[in-house]
Amino acid sequence: MGELVKQMSDVDLACQVLAENGSPMYFRDLIGKVLEGKGRPAASMAHAMAEVHTQINMDSRFVHVGKGMWGLTEWLPQRGIKVVEETAATVSSDSSLRREKLLAEIQQDFPAPGVDAEEGE
């Protein structure tokens, strides 16, 4: 298993670490686990941390959740989709109600040709 980990890319290993953890991690802890798994020497630690942090930041599988914490985007879509669906349903419902009310007002003000206003009511 150790050799397989060393062959993985840094971001793939970071993704695996987060998946195993099951919740967002502070970026230094996450990157520390990646570097530990890869067996990086301590002399290049600052450079290696910056490099891995940049890779994570550019990879769409990761999401910054605030205060230096990183998680996986696969953990978030359900919340995002639900919010979008609820917003779309609300907007659609509001628009339909407004349209119906406006149409009723127009029909009240302007009866169809050949129909008396009193007959149309």
Image (tube, grey):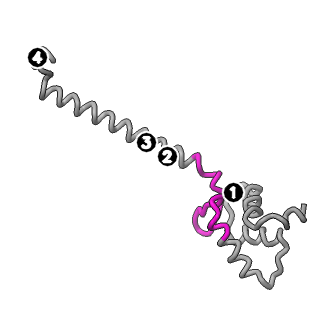
- What amino acid is at disc 3? Ala
The alpha-carbon separation of the residues under discs 3 and 2 comes to 8 Å
Q: Secondary structure at mark 1?
A: loop
Q: Quadrant of residue 48?
A: bottom right
**Residue at label 3?**
88
| The disc label shown at residue 114, or none | 4
Kindly identify the residue that appears in the image at 85 percent across and 73 percent down: 39
The alpha-carbon separation of the residues under discs 1 and 4 comes to 69 Å
- What amino acid is at disc 1? Ser
Viewer-proximal residue, 49 or 110?
110
Q: Give the mark nearer the N terminus: 1 vs 2.
A: 1
Q: Give the mark nearer the N terminus: 3 vs 1.
A: 1
| The disc label shown at residue 23, or none | 1
Circle 4 crowding by C-alpha within 10 Å: few under 14, some 14–19, many from 20: few
The quadrant of the picture occupied by the N terminus is: bottom right
Above or below 64: residue 105: above
* Circle 4/circle 2 CB separation < 8 Å: no
Q: Secondary structure at mark 4?
A: loop
Q: Give the mark nearer the N terminus: 4 vs 2.
A: 2
The alpha-carbon separation of the residues under discs 4 and 2 comes to 48 Å
Q: Is residue 61 magenta?
A: yes
Q: Give the mark nearer the N terminus: 3 vs 2.
A: 2
Kindly identify the residue that appears in the image at 9 percent across and 17 percent down: 116
The alpha-carbon separation of the residues under discs 4 and 3 comes to 40 Å
- What amino acid is at disc 4? Gly
Q: Position of residue 96 (x, y in %)?
A: 33, 34
Circle 1 crowding by C-alpha within 10 Å: few under 14, some 14–19, many from 20: few
Q: Secondary structure at mark 2?
A: helix
Q: Which residues are magenta?
A: 55-78
Position of 84 with respect to 101 (left or right) is right
**Residue at label 2?**
83
